[in-house]
Image (tube, rainbow, N blue to C red):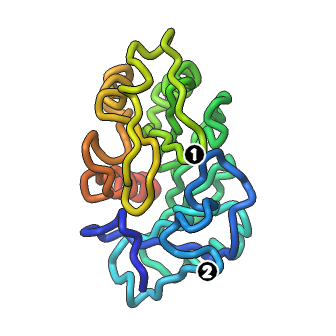
């Protein structure tokens, strides 16, 4: 079984039951970028066996979307003891914890769910140098409803990143750097920019994907923590 290099030294496993590219078309999508995803799209589906996973946690659709061919996704997930779903479509009716990417079009307002269900693990927000006014609204909305928010910083491989200096008091050249992240090269957010954004949202409910200096899952543990909390909440504990 091919493991996601980002998940090295963790108990996470990816599962993508669908074939081909994701039709949603999020900007700068690494999954649809030719040659960028760690499994070529013409070699999908990616479905580990229950024996390979064991007591690990399966991420349904870290690429693609769990609301596309959702019946297939739900049926495939049923074979695993521990699994959660990922989607950017605000249909959260899944038989398990689910992560919602609330702003797949990051330069537009995020989807704001007014009555979040118990199985909502956290809301993922895509952060850029020009969308913090939208992030402000979404963070306030979800934290008021006691929903965790995880900030994921945009990485750019087709466009040069832009920074709104009226909102971010850091020059663009100090906010992004071209480097290899896992297996591909991108303009990636710097620790300086991420620190500024982190400090902008000081809340126990707001955290970042990965850490300031390491983008691997082993340095983050957000998904693991929120998965366990969500399962307990769903059981009424």
Q: What residue sits 31% from the left and 22% below the top?
A: 199
Closest to the camera, between mark 2 and mark 1, is 2
Depicted 186 relative to depicted 127: above or below = below
First in sequence: mark 2 vs mark 1: 2
The residue lying at 40 percent from left, 26 percent from top is: 173
The one nearer the camera, 73 or 95, is 73
The label shown at residue 10 is none
Q: Can residue 114 be seen in this view?
A: no
Secondary element type, mark 2: loop
Looking at the image, which is closer to me, 176 or 206?
176
Secondary-structure class at tag 1: strand
Number of callouts: 2
Residue identifier under label 1: 101
Tag 2: Cα neighbours inside 10 Å, few (<14), some, or many (≥20)?
some
Q: Do the residues labelled 2 and 1 touch (CB within 8 Å)?
A: no
- Residue 13: x and y in percent read 41, 73
**Which residue occupies the extreme top position in the image?**
166
| Residue 211 image offset from top left, x and y in percent | 28, 44
Q: In which quarter of the image is residue 204?
A: top left
Q: As displayed, is residue 109 above or below residue 80? A: above
């Amino acid at each position: 079984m091919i493991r996601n290099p980002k998940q090295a030294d963790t108990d996470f496993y990816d599962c993508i039951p669908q074939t081909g590219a994701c039709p949603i078309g999020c900007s700068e999508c690494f999954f649809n970028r030719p040659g960028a995803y760690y499994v070529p799209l013409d070699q999908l589906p990616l479905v580990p066996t229950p024996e390979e996973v064991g007591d690990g946690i399966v991420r349904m659709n870290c690429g693609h979307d769990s609301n596309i061919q959702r019946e297939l996704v739900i049926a495939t997930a049923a074979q695993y003891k521990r699994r959660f779903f990922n989607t950017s479509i605000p249909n959260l009716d899944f038989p398990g914890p689910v992560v919602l990417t609330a702003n797949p079009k990051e330069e537009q307002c995020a989807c704001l769910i007014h009555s979040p269900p118990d199985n909502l693990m956290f809301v993922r927000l895509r952060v850029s140098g020009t969308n913090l006014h939208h992030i402000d609204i979404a963070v306030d909305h979800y934290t008021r409803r006691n929903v965790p928010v995880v900030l994921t910083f945009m990485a750019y491989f087709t466009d040069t990143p832009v920074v709104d200096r009226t909102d971010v008091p850091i020059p663009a050249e100090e906010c992004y750097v071209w480097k290899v992240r896992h297996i591909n090269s991108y303009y990636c957010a710097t620790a300086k920019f991420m620190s500024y954004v982190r400090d902008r949202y000081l809340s126990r409910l707001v955290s970042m994907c990965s850490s300031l200096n390491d983008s691997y899952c082993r340095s983050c543990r957000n998904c693991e923590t929120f998965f366990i909390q969500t399962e307990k909440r769903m059981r009424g504990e």
